[in-house]
Amino acid sequence: MEPGNQQATGTGAAPLIVLRNIGKSYSTPAGAFQALSEVDLEIGAGEFVALVGKSGSGKSTLLNLIGGIDRPSQGEVFVAGAAVHRVPEKSLAQWRGKTVGVVFQFFQLLPTLTIAENVMLPMDFCNARPARERRAYALGLLEQVGIADQADKLPATLSGGQQQRAAIARALANNPPIIIADEPTGNLDSETSRSVLHLLRKLTERGTTVVIATHERDLSGLIDRTIELVDGAVAPEFSMATK
């Protein structure tokens, strides 16, 4: 059965993300390290899914496979209708720029560019809209995340929460159907963390799929599903609704 004909866990809609029998191993000086093993997963459009587990459990690796940042050692990855494991290397960056917005724990904003210019970068890379429209679109995104008044400031002048909001606006620049975020609240205080999670929740209300790796414990009312990884495998008993 093709991915588009399957039923997603949690929503009943056709899944936007499908991982089949995924394995990922890395070579290390101590020998091969198995980061993921026999992972099967489906995520539907508009779901907010949290990957949880101890450090080293495979959360970040799984996000990287969904985003086409890394390749599986075995298995298949289908995202938004594309067989990501078969996309040529030269085409991956362009595919990712249009399909998956990435939010990093440490923001990764370019320090010499203003906040608005940082948000415009993905548009420049993918040539997603006419150049004359990009700044206005960036300002609109910054308005959505509540920091339009910071548009012409450099990242270093913003608080951690404001920088993370800017990073989310940048991830939305090309209107991707999917946002992945690796510990998006890891460097924020509890109040700011909750605010950022609420912002990500709002994205799903317009149909965006959000998948985060997190150590957050209080996800009640925000996340549709929590999926726990243990030693590189999904623990089925911990795949539950938390909303």
Image (spheres, rainbow, N blue to C red):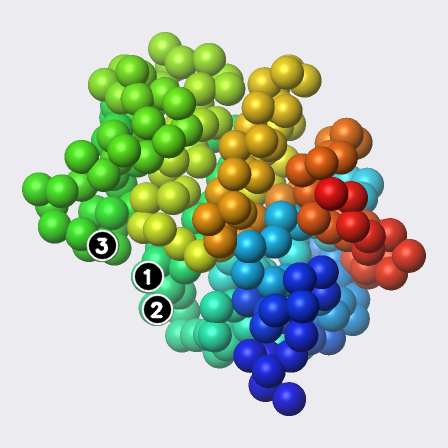
Q: Residue at x 40, y 54 (%)?
A: 176
Q: How far is the residue under mark 1 from the one under mark 3?
A: 11 Å
Callout 1–callout 2 Cβ contact below 8 Å: yes
Residue 72 appears in the rendering: no
Callout 2–callout 3 Cβ contact below 8 Å: no
Residues 66 and 179: in front is 179
Q: Residue furthest right?
A: 237
Label of residue 91 in the image? 2
Q: Residue at x 8, y 42 (%)?
A: 132
Q: Residue at x 42, y 33 (%)?
A: 167
Label of residue 238 in the image? none
Q: Position of residue 74 (x, y in %)?
A: 67, 75
Residues 185 and 46: in front is 46
> Which quadrant of the view contains residue 5?
bottom right
Label of residue 128 in the image? 3
Q: Helix, strand or loop at disc 2?
A: helix
- Taking the image as shown, residue 108 lies to the left or right of residue 216, namely left
Q: Position of residue 144 (x, y in %)?
A: 37, 31
Q: How far is the residue under mark 2 from the one under mark 3?
A: 16 Å
Point out the tag, 2 or 3, that comes first from the N-terminus.
Answer: 2
Point out the tag, 1 or 3, that comes first from the N-terminus.
Answer: 1
Q: Position of residue 72 (x, y in %)?
A: 62, 69
Residue position for label 1: 94
Q: Quick one: quadrant of the N terminus?
A: bottom right
**Amino acid beneath label 1:** Gln
**Amino acid beneath label 3:** Ala
> Which quadrant of the view contains residue 195?
top right
Callout 1–callout 3 Cβ contact below 8 Å: no
Q: Helix, strand or loop at disc 1?
A: helix
